Amino acid sequence: MITRFISDLHLSENRPDITGLFVSFLRGEARESDALYILGDLFDYWIGDDDLRPFHLHIIQELKNVVESGVPVYFMAGNRDFLIGKKFAELTGITILPDPTVVDLYGTPTLLLHGDTLCTQDEGYQKFRKTIRNPLLLGILTKLPLSWRRKVAQKLRANSKSQQNLSAEQLAMMDATEEAVVQAFESHKVERMIHGHTHQPDIHEHPLSEGKTGLRIVLGDWYEQGSILELTADTFILRNEPFSEDED
């Protein structure tokens, strides 16, 4: 059988092509999996489990259908949807995982992360992450009116879009660092890691202590096509899934 991994879909009402491909995936091959792992940024932004607009209810129902088909779905929050909580989990039936988490995949301990904590050169973002994830601040944020939270999310999205035309040097600064990656491998005593966030799908090998080698699999985003990791007991493939003209 196959375990599948996805991340960085950034679902929104403005991108029906992404939503259509995701729904097709959930209704098809996702149900032929041992398990489905979503490693963050499922939504372009999530301002709280009380924001149950029709679009969100549609995604919730599709996820619930996968779970009810007998396939466990695991979710790890990203930097866009860290406010997904217990109510969302109850409505969908998914299991929320802390970041990071080590899971046994066909006998191999594997470290799962969203990936943003590995980008340690981006000091501005790391400070912002630490502040915004403060439980006290989160408690205040979730009690604000939905309209206020939407404005905050829109401002953050605008700031994110303004960073899309960065130089190669700036983009490198926002990537995972070798030091952080090796430290994650060593501290969790694993030799395989899977994460998203950087939108740079690839397979990396990292020299570790005692002559070991760490295998790091980076998932891709869904902006131009779907990106799916299929992993079995013996092998894996990181593949793209093109958009179809029929996606809606």
Image (cartoon, rainbow, N blue to C red):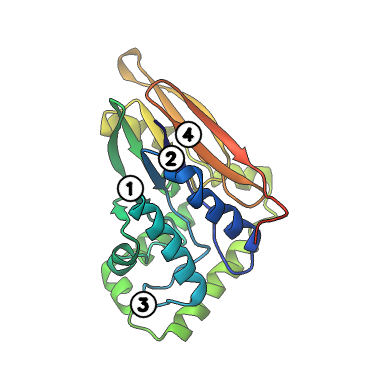
Residue tagged by mark 2? 32
Kind of element beneath mark 1: loop
Question: Looking at the picture, does residue 230 appear above or below residue 62?
Answer: above
* Label located before the other in sequence (1 or 3): 1
- The percent coordinates of residue 151 (x first, y second) are 52, 80
Q: At label 1, which amino acid type do we have? A: Gly
Q: Which of marks 2 and 4 is in front?
A: 2
Question: Looking at the picture, does residue 73 appear above or below residue 213?
Answer: below
- The percent coordinates of residue 233 (x first, y second) are 37, 24
Is the C-beta separation of discs 4 and 3 under 8 Å?
no
Outermost residue on the right side: it is 245
Outermost residue on the top side: it is 211
Distance between the Cα atoms at labels 1 and 3? Answer: 35 Å
Distance between the Cα atoms at labels 2 and 3? Answer: 38 Å
* Label located before the other in sequence (2 or 1): 2
Q: In which quarter of the image is residue 52?
A: bottom left
Q: At label 4, which amino acid type do we have? A: Glu
